[in-house]
Every structure is written in C-alpha cells, then in structure tokens.
C-alpha cells in the first residue's frame, strides 16, 4: 500500500526522514539512473528551487521509502535571481533546458504553480506504475488547489499519462 504526503518547510519536522528520502530518491533517479549533472550532497539531489515557498509530494510506503515525487513552486516566487525552472530556462539561466520551450512568455501569477522534478523510481514495477503515477498526480492536484493554484505548468515526457 502506498501513501501520499505533501511536505513543506512548515511540516517537514513531522515526517521524520521523508524529505531526505525524497531527495535521495531524486538522486537515484536523476543523477544515478539518468546521469544528469545536478547539485548533490550526501546522496541527495537538490537545487535552487527547493525553497520554503515550494511543496514536495512524496508517494511512499509506511516505512518512508519514497517511490515517486514532484516539487510544486509558485510562479510568483523569487529567490535571488531565480524564479521557477521553466521561466528561468526561458530567461537563459539554465543551459540544459532550451530557452524556447514555451510559445509565449512564462506566466507569473498566484493561481499558476510549476511542477518540476517529477519522478517514479525504478523500484516501482510496471504493474504498479500507473497506480503510483495516479496517486502522485492526485496528491499534486489536491496540494496545488489548497495553495490557490488553478493551473499547473510543467515539463513532462511525451508518454506521461
């Protein structure tokens, strides 16, 4: 049985190792498996968008093992020169993402949030994958709505459900 938990800087302390396990799962997915050149420390992947303004959704078991996750960030957030990943790519601040990824200027509005660092770990069997993805999406949408979002903007693979 999988659980879905939304983490924030306000509730991380209530969930033990879950946030660290989420960053470890991101490390395994993006750095180890996909060989992406990303920031890392102590077996955890993180970047400049992991700020107190963000929310992280983790699909996990009752022992805290993370099987899927996503980060949600308000498009209105700024931290130094950074805003959110898609907008910053468009502004030329992220070399690994093309600046022409949108047909129009990236939005900045309180009712639009960005989803990024979406993953499902390789430990999820093909039989369970769709159920885990749907649980992740359901919790992501619920969380975004609670945060006042009416739209979610994100980069996803073409074959995603």
Image (cartoon, grey):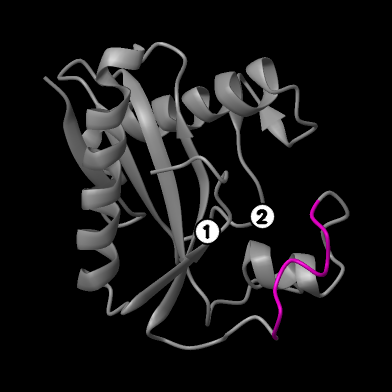
- Residue 91 appears in view: yes
| Crowdedness near tag 2: few (<14), some (14–19) or many (≥20) residues, C-alpha within 10 Å | few
Q: Residue 102 occupies which quadrant of the picture?
A: bottom right
**Who's the residue at 62% across and 77% down the image?**
78
Q: Residue furthest left?
A: 1
**Who's the residue at 69% across and 85% down the image?**
104
Asked if disc 1 and disc 2 are in contact, CB closer than 8 Å, the reply is yes
- Residue where numbered disc 2 is placed: 48
Q: In this image, 140 relative to 28: left or right?
A: left
Q: In this image, 72 relative to 127: left or right?
A: right
Query: CA gap, disc 1 to disc 2?
Result: 7 Å
Compared with 147, 121 (above or below) is: above
Give the number of marks.
Answer: 2
Q: Quadrant of the N terminus?
A: top left
- Residue 14 appears in view: no
Q: Residue 145 occupies which quadrant of the picture?
A: bottom left
Q: Which mark is residue 51?
A: 1
Q: Position of residue 67 (x, y in %)?
A: 35, 23
Q: In this image, 6 relative to 44: left or right?
A: left
Q: Residue 10 occupies which quadrant of the picture?
A: bottom left
């Amino acid at each position: 049985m999988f659980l879905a938990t939304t983490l924030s800087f306000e509730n991380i302390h209530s969930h033990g190792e879950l946030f660290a396990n989420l960053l470890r799962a991101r490390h395994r997915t993006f750095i180890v498996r996909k060989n992406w050149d990303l920031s890392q420390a102590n077996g955890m992947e993180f970047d400049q968008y992991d700020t107190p303004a963000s929310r992280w959704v983790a699909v996990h078991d009752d022992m805290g093992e993370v099987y899927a996750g996503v980060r949600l960030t308000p498009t209105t957030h700024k931290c130094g020169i950074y805003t959110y990943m898609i907008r910053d790519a468009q502004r030329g601040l992220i070399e690994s993402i093309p600046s022409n990824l949108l047909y129009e200027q990236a939005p900045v509005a309180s009712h639009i949030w960005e989803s990024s660092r979406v993953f499902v770990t390789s430990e999820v069997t093909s039989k369970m994958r769709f159920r885990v993805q749907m649980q992740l999406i359901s919790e992501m949408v619920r969380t975004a709505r609670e945060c006042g979002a009416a739209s979610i903007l994100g980069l996803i693979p073409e074959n995603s459900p």
